[in-house]
Amino acid sequence: MREMVRLFVAVAVFSAVAGGLLSTVKSVTQERIELQQLTFVKGPTISKIMEGCSNNPFDDRFKLKDGEREIDFFIGEFDGKQNTVAFEAYGKGFGGEIGVMVAVNIEKDEIVGVGVTTHSETAGLGSRAKTDPSFSEQFKGMSIEDTFMVKADDGEIDALSGATVTSRGVCAAVMEASDTYKRLKHEIVNNMKT
Amino acid sequence: MAKSVVQEFTKGLWAEIPPFRLVLGLCPTLAVTKSLENGVGMGIATTFVLVCSNVLISLLRNVIPKKVRIACYIIVIATFVTVVELFMQAYAYPLFLQLGIFIPLIVVNCIVLGRAEAFASKNKVFPSLADGLGIGIGFTLSLAALSTFREILGKGTLTLPFIEGPINVLGPSFQPFSFLIEAPGAFMCLGLMLCVMNMLGKK
């Protein structure tokens, strides 16, 4: 019995020390990890959909609370004015959640660009939502008030052939982005130097 | 057991070089050696874990109760692996994306647990440190050799660590053997390497 207790205590002490060490390391590196994820996962998409902006959207970013969620907003400067904002929204695709970055011009309430950031769709079919520019460019210039739906659901967006579910997921994400934008527009404008 | 620290270090570089002589740790050896950068990254991560766990386990060898030693070793190893994983995410995110699941899998790399059980738990700190360092560097060199071979013939390029982008080695007219960077090609390359090692080792 005594030996059992001794073994138990040994393992417990080991685990406790290890846990403490890990939480320290985690808290030290957390901020940098978030930054790296932004740069390498969302970065390429952001610079693609806000091509030609004269600032670095990463330096000019802010966070807003939307209910429970915190959303990162990236500011784009065009023609010397901070008039575009990009943020991420999610929709359900074929293989899981699709993350879609949506850039909106706040003066015209118009979509500047849409790009997929993260997805787990079928390679070669659904994955074209990220790689095929002719799909994502359909959103360009649409008003944020529009309804975004694929043609099969009486909408205006041409779905990717063979990947209707993925296309619906992207549309749902843009719809969510549109709702978020309408809800938070006042706060977004306050955070930008127009 | 009267070997010098230097001998403990050098045995990992040739006589007991892990993937080729001990034929241990084959899972990462086969999986991540698609490019030189990945191979070296994986080697360095494993070396760090190996050295740290060897030193710590050697220091604690009289404290750890014999009956639960494996559990304790795994806790020590898993802690260092998680530390490596976090630091890699923070400072080398693209490499982390490339290596993915194989970083957490260092926990079950039999080289690390093997050295803890077979060496560090029976030896003093300095020989354990030398042993970990030697085996780790040997492992890194093996991965580097294998991945250089596979990448040059499989893609015609070479991605050096710390340098952006692949370097085209064999020129544009080279038709790559893309088979070599697929999984079966890994087995074939490893087999060839083992064959060469055995030929060289034969007196």
Image (cartoon, coloured by chain):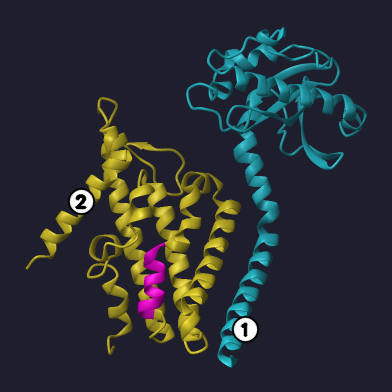
Residue B41, given in percent of the width and then of the height, sits at 44, 53
Residue B91 lies in magenta, yes or no? no
At 58% from the left edge and 12% from the top edge, which residue is drawn? Answer: A134
Q: Residues within 10 Å of mark 2 (few under 14, many from 20)?
A: few
Q: As drawn, which residue projects farthest toward the left?
A: B203
In the picture provided, is B15 more to the left or to the right than B36? left
Q: Amino acid at mark 1?
A: Val
Q: Which mark is residue B191?
A: 2
In the rendered image, the vertical position of residue A17 relative to residue A22, given as above or below: below
Which corner quadrant holds the N terminus of chain B?
A: bottom left
Tag count in the figure?
Answer: 2
The quarter of the picture where residue A176 lies is: top right
> What residue range appears in magenta?
B109-119
Q: Which mark is residue A9?
A: 1
Residue A168, given in percent of the width and then of the height, sits at 66, 19
Q: Using the image, name the chain to which the residue with label 2 belongs.
A: B
Residue B112, given in percent of the width and then of the height, sits at 41, 68
At 58% from the left edge and 24% from the top edge, which residue is drawn? Answer: A130
Residue B115 lies in magenta, yes or no? yes
Mark 2 touches mark 1? (CB < 8 Å): no
Which corner quadrant holds the C terminus of chain B?
A: bottom left
At 28% from the left edge and 41% from the top edge, which residue is drawn? Answer: B184
Chain A tint in image: cyan
As drawn, the chain in yellow is B
In this rendering, the label closer to the viewer, 2 or 1: 1
Q: Report the front residue among A95 and B11.
A: A95
